[in-house]
Every structure is written in structure tokens, then in C-alpha cells.
Amino acid sequence: MILEMTLPIPSGTRDVLPDEMRERHGVVAALRDVFSTHGYGEISTPAVEYASVLERAGVSASGDAADPRFRSVDEHGETLVLRSDMTVPIARLVGSRFSDAPLPIRLSYQAHLYRAIVPGRGQSREVLQAGVELVGAGAPDGTAEALTVLVGALKAVGLGDARVAVGDASIFPALLTGAGVGDEQQAAILHELATRDLVGLEREIRAACDAATAEMLLDLASRRGGTEVLDALTDPRAIEATSGVRQIVERVGDDARSHLILDLGLTLKLGYYTGAVFEVYAPGQGHAIGGGGRYDDLLGRFGRDLPAVGFALDVDALHTALVGKARGSWRTGWAAGGAVAPVAAPPVGDQPVGTHAPIAGGTNPSEVSS
Amino acid sequence: MNPFGLRIAVPRGVMMKPTLDALDRVGVDTREVRENDRKLLFADAGIVTMRPSDVATYVESGAADIGVTGKDVLMEQRTRDVVELADLGYGPCKMVLASIAGDPDPAEEALRRLGVMRVATKYVTIATRYLEATGRQAEIVEVKGSVELAPLTGMVDAIVDLTATGTTLRENGLVVREEIATSTARLIANPAAHRLRAAEVDALRGALLGA
């Protein structure tokens, strides 16, 4: 069927119709419930901010995902940007609105963010994120709390089989500084680590370090798994550098711990992380569906020098993971895929959606739930 | 499924045979793949075959857990989020800047007299970044097929292309002016599989490097 007229929307954006919206609300409701149960108050901030304010975070210089790509100029000649992450606006909010609030401050959000995309990768310019920021709670207790909330959130939306990779952005800088590696070589090594090029990593590390140190660093960068990853370390420098990860593992409960994958080589491309970093993976999904970490230096740039930790989940990626579990398997032949996974129960409102004019593909949940 | 339980993306073309040989040595039965030139997906062996430039796409998306492709592909598709696990060493070739043989180099002449050189390539990202990094203005012309034709017809002054032996360049009267990078086969993994299937990924990587 060729429609008479379809007006385009920008690449990387899309319309959401009632069926999807109902299910998305179910995901968001489940997340909100977990966040508020743990004492996180929901906030909202403007989608547009002054570029000069967000630049205090130092993210725009690093050219990463948090670099705002949508800019305009207001009537006073100030540059405005559409926010590209929520951590920096919340750092601004805490510095300005919570300047003497008792600690810790627990905040949650669900907000649309705007990013640059690489065409042809199914990436979104407009991303709906839900997450929390825990301000004024240092490592390791604050980090353990954030991970506990994160695992609780994943389970609440029905993704109990998702896993959180946990690393520490301070491990490699500390070890490299200890080994006397200069800033320039450190930057090269950290770049290979962040872009996950283990061949380049080996080349750079061997060029910068003595053989024993190089072995230790390369071994560390490749270790992923449970607590045995930490137990197997023998080099005292490695044990010392990973003590932060060990403390986190000791402080989270058994249930949350069973959802963690320690990844000692994990670093994130975002420049502001100072300690623990997280990435969330779900079976059948090739990409991380969420992430976060500790950013103890960020708040100070916005007027309140406080340690902080947070995470964000991509709501549509969670939804895709719930709907599309079967998509992760090879469909040989054309047999129907596995059963569609249940999506977090959509809240059936008082006013059934079916009272509206029928929309193609729209189904009233009350009609199908029987 | 193979003993590693991983879905492996194997590149067609010159890297296919050494890749299948390496997989055979570590206990993946690749007979069906060798005997069947048109089939693409081999569920029993856990292998999918595709052109090398598609391997990073399938691995990034998670449709394959692990795969083999050239460093040239990874350099060209530099924003792909995959883990580069190991240099497998085979399939060596060079990314070069070449132009029609003789003195002066027509590309340098164009740059000196016209301020810009026209360069044909299949590797737009690599060519653009290299010419930028070496401070030369260039007009990049993307072609899909035999790049050697482009300077012969006068469409461009030089090409950026991959060469293993240099035979094709020579036979078309072209000479290598600059070597941009060397490329060998790389083992890559999907970042989610790298964490969620860490033991299996490490087992296959270790076996391939030890074999």
C-alpha cells in the first residue's frame, strides 16, 4: 500500500502510537515505582540549557556522546543547547537548588535527551532515559546503593536476566601513574581501552611499561566474571587498584551481586566518571541498554563539591529487550520465533483507550487480557 | 552449534580459507561451510558467512557473537562498537596512496598547481582522515568497484586502496606513493557477548591464538 502523503520526520526520531505507548508506560511505571520505593524524588529540568552552563562539566571538549549536538541562539545571543544527558543538568540543579539540603540527595528522572547519531545504525536522536542520581554518598556505600536500585529496576520491568558490568574508571589511571607512565602515553592507553581495541591496548601498554607491568595491566584489562576475578589477582598493585571494586561487591546484597559481572577493563567514553562505572546488558541485545557510574569531581564544578553516583536506563531499549527476546536467536527457516516475553503489566486506566476512534493496530488491553 | 557455543561471523573472500582453517584447528567443524558455496547460515557449525565489510555490522548488532574481519574494515568503520580481541596475523595487506607511475607524481602536481588532489577510494573515512592528518586538501570520490580505473580515465589524481602484492596496481601502471597503514585479520566480539559470554569468548580467543 502506497500512502498518498507521508510527511517525513528527522532520521533517528519516531512517532509512538497507542500500543507501544501503553507498554512504554508500563516500563516507566515499574521503574518509577522502584525509584520512589528507594526514596528517590522525581525531578524535571528544562530540555534546553545554556551551553555555557553545561560546558562547566567539561564534556563538550571530549567529543563524546554527552556533547550537545543541537544548538541555537536565543534573543540575547546566548547559545542554547538541547540536553544530551541528565547527569550534568542534575549537577547544575543540585548546585543551584539544593545548596544547603541535607545529604544524601536522592533524585530520579525520566526525560528525553537529544544526541547526534551515526546514520544506518538504528540509533535515536531522541532518547527516553530513566535513572537516578545519588548525591553526597561516597564510595563504596553510595555505589552499592545505586547498584542495588539498578538491579531492582531491571527485575521490576521483567529483565531479571539482564546483567550489570561493573568496572572502575580509576583502576588504569592509578596503575599507570604508579608505573610512571606520562600523561600522553596514559591518554593513548585509556583511548584504546575506551574504544575496546585490545590489540591497540597491548601495543600501547608494551610501548609504555616494563614487561611485568605490561603483563599485569593486560591481564587486568581482560578479566571479566564473578568475584573470582578479584580473588585470582596476585600482583599487589592490581589488588590495591581494584580495592574499590572489592568494597562494592562486599557491600551489595547477594541478590544484586548475582546480577553483576565484574569487568576490570571497563571504562566509559564519558569523561566525567571518576570511580565505579556500569554498563547494563540484556540477553539478545547487542548493545548496552543502560549505564552509569561515579562522578566525584562533577558537582564541584557546579558549586557544591560532593561525591555522586548515578545510572540511566534507555526506556525503549528495555522495552525492545522485553518484546524482542526471541530476536536475539538465529531464525533458520521461517518457523515462528519463541514466545514473546511478557511486558511489565500495562496499567489499565479507568478510561479504556478503546473509547477513542479505532487506530490501525491499536488494541484495548482490557479486550485482550481475558 | 560449535563447541564454544558462539555464533561466529566468517568473512568471504581471501580471509575465508585461513579463517576456516583456524576454526578447524580449534575444533569447529567447518566441512559444511567449505562444501557449500551459496549457503550463508550454518546452524550446526554456528557460522554465518558474509563479505568482510559486513562482519563488523553483524557483530556490533549482536547477530553474531564473534567474528573475523580485516583491520582495514575496523579502521574504515571506526565508530562501530565492537571489542577488538586479537590480531590473527593472516591476510596481511597495506592501505596505500597510489598514482600513475612517473615523475612528477600527478597527485603532488595537482596539489601544487591546483591546491587540491582528487582521490578515488572505497575507504572514504580512512582516505579523508589520512589526507587531513597530513595537511593536504583533497576531493574524495567514492567508487564501489575497481579503483585503479579512476586515475587511468583522468577522473582523479590518485587512489587510496588496499593492496596485498601490488600486482593489480602495477598492471594498471600505478605505483605506491605512500603507505597509510598495514592490515591483518582481527578477531572481534560483540560488547554484550564479551561480558555475558566472557568464558566462551576467552576460550575461543585463547584457542585461536594458541593454535
Image (spheres, rainbow, N blue to C red):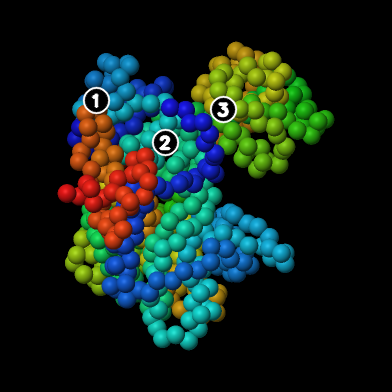
Q: Which residue is mark 1?
A: A333
Point out residue B106 in the picture as x, y percentages from the top left corner.
74, 24
Disc 1 vs disc 2: which is toward the camera? 1
Disc 1 to disc 3: CB gap under 8 Å: no
Asked whether the viewer can see residue A303, the reply is yes
Question: Against B176, is B205 above or below?
Answer: below
Instruction: Kindly identify the residue that appears in the image at 72 percent across and 18 percent down.
Output: B154
Q: Which residue is mark 2?
A: B57
Chain hosting mark 3: B
Between A332 and B162, the residue placed more toward the observer is A332
Residue type of the residue flagged with mark 3: Lys
The tag on residue A204 is none
Pointers 1 and 3 within a single chain: no
- Image quadrant assignment for residue A106: bottom left
Label placed on residue B122: 3
**Which of labels 3 and 2 is toward the front?**
2
Q: Residue at x 61, y 18 (%)?
A: B148
Instruction: Work out how far the residue at label 1 is from the one at label 2, CA to CA, in angstroms.
Output: 22 Å
Residue at 23% in and 65% down: A256
Same subunit, labels 1 and 2: the answer reads: no
The answer to which image quadrant residue A308 occupies is bottom left
> Which secondary structure, mark 1?
loop
Q: Give me the chain letter of mark 2.
A: B
> Helix, strand or loop at disc 3?
loop
Q: Pointer 1 and pointer 2: residues touching (CB < 8 Å)?
A: no
Numbered marks: total: 3
